[in-house]
Amino acid sequence: MQFRIPLKLALLPAPLLFASLLPALVVLAPLAASAQDAAETPTGPIDGAAGLSLSQALATSGPAVWICAVLAVLAFYFAVEGFFKFRAAALAPPEELARLRELLHYGHYQEAWRTCAAGRSFLCVVAGAGLERVGRGADAVEFALTEASFRQAAVLKTSLNYLSVIGVVAPMIGLTGTVLGMIRAFEVLGDPRALAGAIGHVLTATAAGLLAAIPGFAFYYLFKSKAQTAILLADDAIYRLFEHLPYEALAGGMVGPEAEGLAEIEATQAPEESEG
């Protein structure tokens, strides 16, 4: 069975990539041990199950355990990503904030918009949307900032939704693996020792689902609060940038892509007029 590693996971730095694989070991190692213990009874090992190695235990654990291991890796990856992403300094980088504050202080609104257009942070996207409305008054700017903030917050919280999905789906996958394994286990109903070993073995799928789901839910609620706090702090910094702008003096002015297009037209017309 082959699994494709998501592109974002493959682009992680080597230490983080290694760390993101640890949950799979956490899921698989105890399950392999339990599979080996389940293959033995108090009176001795089941015939053909003696000396069950780690690789054999994992090979016979069923696809549900492997799927849950992959979900555990993804949950930890989204947690690592959230740790770096849901910080006020990441949403509103201090150097970008200082640059925009300086440009707005000196009235270089178009240059401030260019800075935002070149950036990809939460600050640049939201502030850029507000700068495009400065000629329409304070109310239009506030509406644009609020709308852009909600939109970017929804994009940022996508990984949180994935953590929630993992927390819900992983136990069901584990339970499905256990149910299917129980159906096969009852084929040896006439042999109590074999039945007991088979039941103990298939319960590893349920354990795998729980081991993947519990961290997923824990990370989900942890970063849900952390994300909300970081977004509020970034929003506060952005609103302070636009707090004291001279909106009356800027009324009717153009900032943004329209102003860029106008500057290009004027730049092309200037040589023609000089030639004429």
Image (tube, helix red, strand yellow):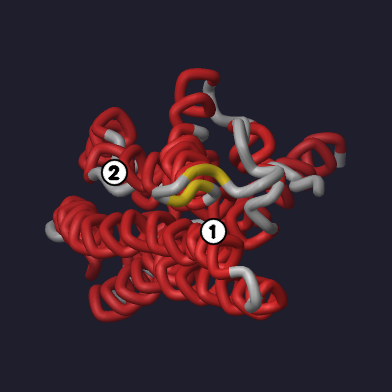
How many numbered tags mark residues here?
2
Determine which residue is flagged by label 2: 92
Q: Residue furthest front?
A: 43
What residue is drawn where x is 22% and y is 57%?
A: 222
Which mark's residue is nearer the viewer, 2 or 1? 1
What residue is drawn where x is 75% and y is 45%?
A: 4
Q: Is residue 6 visible?
A: no
How many residues crowd around disc 2 within 10 Å: few (fewer than 14), some, or many (20 or more)? many
Ranked by sequence position, the earlier of labels 2 and 1 is: 2
| Residue 181: quadrant of the picture | bottom right
Q: Position of residue 233 (x, y in %)?
A: 16, 54
- Say what secondary structure mark 1 lies in: helix
Left or right: residue 117 compared with residue 237:
right
Q: Position of residue 174 (x, y in %)?
A: 53, 68
Q: Is residue 143 above or below residue 38?
A: below
Q: Residue furthest top?
A: 14
Name the residue nearer the viewer: 23 or 84.
23
| Residue 26: quadrant of the picture | top left
Q: Is residue 269 above or below residue 235?
A: above
Name the residue nearer the viewer: 31 or 231.
31
Identified by mark 1, the residue type is Gly
Q: Is residue 206 above or below residue 59?
A: below
Determine which residue is flagged by label 1: 197
If the image is split into quadrants, where does the C terminus sit? top right
- Say what secondary structure mark 2 lies in: loop
Assess whether mark 1 and mark 2 are in contact (beta carbons under 8 angstroms). no
What residue is drawn where x is 18% and y is 51%?
A: 237
Alpha carbon distance from label 2 to label 1:
56 Å
Name the residue nearer the viewer: 151 or 58.
58
Identified by mark 2, the residue type is Ala
What residue is drawn where x is 71% and y is 43%?
A: 48
Name the residue nearer the viewer: 274 or 26.
26
